[in-house]
Image (cartoon, rainbow, N blue to C red):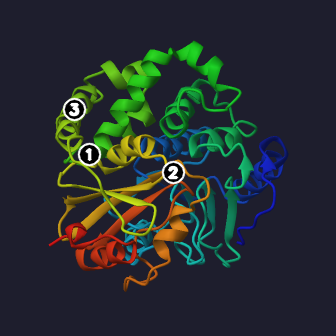
Amino acid sequence: MTISDSPPLPLEQALGPARERAAAFLRALPSTARIVVFCHFDADGLATGALFGRGLARMGFSDVRVVHSDRGENAFSAGARQRLAALRPDALIVTDLGVDRAGVLPGVPTLYVDHHRPDGEPDDAASTVVLAYGWDPIPASAWLAYDLLSPLVQVDDLAWIAAVGTISDLGEKAPWDALPAIRKQWSGKWLREAVSLVNAARRGSAFDVGTPLRMLMEADGPRAIAEDDALGADRLRAYRAEVQAELAIARKQAPMFSADQPWALVPIDSGCQIHPLIAQQWRTRLPKFAVIAANRGYLPGVVAFSARTQRTDLVLPTLLRAPDVGADDEASYGRGHDQASGGHLPRAQFNRLMDALGFDARAQVG
C-alpha cells in the first residue's frame, strides 16, 4: 500500500466500497466458522472488538471470540501469531492494530479494519483491507466498525459503544454526524465516564483489560460501565485513582530538548501507562516540537514511549523509524498516526534512537 500526497478521499465516497468489501468477506464465511476478533487494548480498540463480537453474534455466527492485544505486544510479532494460531481460527478480524505487509496469520481469511498509517499491505490473497487512513475525516476504528456493521445487522442499541471508542480517540466534537444524537440519547456525562474508566484499566499497573472488554460485551449502556460494581465498575474506579496519583507525580517532570532537531523529551518512571497522557499534555505546551514521553518503569528492561505533535509537517512514524537503531522488522515502535506514534524499545536501542534525534547523555536510560 503506497502512501501518496493525493487529496483525501471524502468519507461518504469511501464508505460504500468499504462496506461492500467487509460484507463480501463476512458473507463468504459459514455461520459455524470460528471468528477471532483481534483488537487493540485502548478504548477505541476494545469498543471496536465488542461491536464486532456482539454484531457478528447477531448475524448468526455461533463461534466468535474477541481477543485483545497484550501489553507491549506488536500485533504482527511471532508471539501474537502463536497466541492467535493456538485458537485455531477459521477467520480473523484484526482491528485498531495497524496494517502491516507481514500480515498476522497468512493463509487465514483476515479482515483488517483500521485507521492508522499502514506499513504496507499483506499480499496474502486471503486478506481484505478496510483502511480509513486517507479518508476525510478519518474515523475512529469503533465508528468505522459501526458503519460497516449497520447495513448488515441491527446495531442501533450498540451505538453507545461506538461513541465510547470515538470520543476516546477524537473527542466529544469528533466529526461523526451520528455522534450528537448518540450523546443525547445515552448522556454525554455517562459516555465521558465510560471512556475514562475503560482507558483507566489499560493504564493501571495491573493491565486488567479483560474487565472493560467483558463489560463492553455485556453492558446495556455506558452508565453500567460507570456504576455496575457487579460488572466490575469498582475495579475500574480503583485503576483510575492509581493512574491519577501517578500522573500527579509525572506532571512535575520538566522536558529536555534536542540540540538540533524539533524534539522534546520528558522522562518518567511509572508502572502505569501514563506516557501517552504526558506526551499529550506537553504537545499543546510545546507546539513547535514533537514531544516524546519515555517511561522506563512500565515494562522490564524496555522503554515505553509516546510521541505527539501539533505540527502537521512532521510524520512521526516515519521520523521515528528513520534512524537505524538495530531493531528488527517486528519491533513495536514507529506505528500509529502521523501526529501520534510511539512504541517500545529495549533500553540500548532506545538510547540509540535518542542519540540519533539529537539528545545529549541526560536522555540515556541505564
Name the amino acid type tagged 2.
Val
- Give the structural element (helix, strand or loop) at label 3: helix
Gap in angstroms between the C-alphas marked 2 and 3? 26 Å
Q: Is residue 75 above or below residue 292?
A: below
Find residue 338 and report its image quarter: bottom right
Residue located beneath label 1 in the image: 208
Residue 364: where, in percent of width, then height? 22, 71
Q: Residue placed farthest to the front in the image?
A: 259
Name the amino acid type tagged 3.
Arg
- Give the structural element (helix, strand or loop) at label 1: loop
Name the amino acid type tagged 1.
Asp
Residue 33: where, in percent of width, then height? 58, 59
Residue at image x 37%, y 72%? 358
Relative placement, left or right, of 106 versus 234 is: right
Residue 97: where, in percent of width, then height? 50, 59
Residue located beneath label 2 in the image: 64
Nearer the observer, 63 or 312: 312
The answer to the question of whether label 1 and label 3 lie on touching residues, with beta carbons closer than 8 A, is yes
Residue at image x 43%, y 24%? 192
Residue 352: where, in percent of width, then height? 32, 79
- Give the structural element (helix, strand or loop) at label 2: strand
- Mark whose residue sits in front, 2 or 3: 3
Residue located beneath label 3 in the image: 235
Residue count near mark 3 (Cα–Cα under 10 Å), binned few <14, some 14–19, many ≥20: some
* Sequence order check, earlier mark of 2 and 1: 2
